[in-house]
Amino acid sequence: MRACLGHLAARKNKGPLEDALKLAAGKRHFVAGINPSSVAMNDFKNELAKQWKGFNSLLDLKTATVALDFGTATQFELVARYPAANKANDARKAAEGVKAAIELLALPTLVDALKQALPPAQAKDATDGIARALDSYKVEQKDTLVTVKFKIENKMVEALLSAGGVK
Amino acid sequence: MEKRLMASFFSSFRAVPALAAAVVLGLLLADGVVSAPAPPVPKGDAGDLALVPADAQGLITLRIADLYKLDIVRKGLAALEKQSGAKTDFVAELRKATGLAPADVERFTSVIVDAKADVSYAIVSTTKPYDRARLLDKLGGAKTVKHGGRTYHVGKIASAPSDVAMYFVNPRVIVYAPRAG
């Protein structure tokens, strides 16, 4: 509580979380922002399992903001700010690689699981929904900013919940 | 020493203090009881986000009233209840933690000031003025504490593991914090 009261006494309204605060002030249902130290991020990278090392450049960020909007589809937006444009460029490439990794490594297992858990028509709807979600996956870079966006249809989420035994 | 910082940081988000989780779920699930006393009330922006230092380590915001209108959220909550095994009625426990209903809560914000030092707090902004007495009633054994010319309250919220501090910022904004933070 004293941290909050201390802030009230000497407001710090300029800083790394400004991007997140601007998004939070809008109508987004969910916004999360992080402002980790580079030392902490390096430690985190060192602890990553070997198979994920190819995505290390994603973690060179200074700040990251995630925003979600839930309507007939869930819109996902990640905005990461990097210390330099070349770092952002490396991160953009890694972010593009995430989609390929999901398609190659996770998708076959998920599709099999859905086929086992759901009636054929529902399983098809769910797998089609996953394909559309992957199609909507877009990565953009503007100077030191990298933005990742995609959307997931509610029908697909409901199918996944149903596969998990939720009516 | 720094080695544990990242783990600590992310664990803070995973376990956004028990208090914060309790408040969120409580807000989502409690019965509606906001009523309207009346001093000057902020119109439009409640001013809650001004309580977040822009140099904090992290923040999470949820627009609870808007979210609670969505079918998918209600289904998600049902899923959580089922996962708990139906024997743990954490919902009933959490209802006691707050006097606010989902439709009353415009935005819930969790602020991680310093993950390593475990300093965090939660901000709740309401869509209309809350009933201060009713909220205070949820704080068992409440005592007042003065700090820097401001007064806040410390007591026990049913589901929280330790004492909780509550500060009424204005008629639409409340701050909750773990006693130590």
Image (spheres, coloured by chain):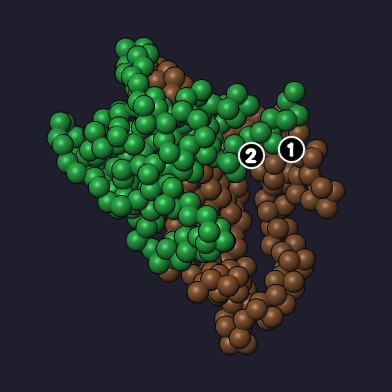
Label drawn at residue B10: 2
Is the C-beta separation of discs 2 and 1 under 8 Å?
yes
How many residues crowd around disc 1 within 10 Å: few (fewer than 14), some, or many (20 or more)?
Answer: some
Q: Secondary structure at mark 1?
A: helix
Q: CA distance from mark 2 to mark 1?
A: 10 Å
- Tell me the shade of chain B: green
Q: Is residue A123 above or below residue B145?
A: below
* Residue beneath disc 1: A44
Q: In the rendered structure, the residue with mark 2 lies on which chain? A: B
Corner quadrant of residue A38: top right
Residue plotted at (69% across, 62% down): A99
Give the side of residue A29 with respect to residue A144, left or right.
left
Left or right of A71? Residue A94 is right
Q: Amino acid at mark 2?
A: Phe
Q: Are the numbered discs 2 and 1 placed on the same chain, yes or no? A: no
Q: Chain of mark 1?
A: A
Chain depicted in brown: A
Percent coordinates x, y for residue A136 in the rendering: 57, 67
Q: Residue at x 44, y 47 (%)?
A: B93
The kind of secondary structure element at disc 2 is helix
What amino acid does circle 1 point to? Phe
User: Looking at the picture, how far across and down is residue A117, in whole percent?
Assistant: 65, 78
Q: Quadrant of residue A105?
A: bottom right
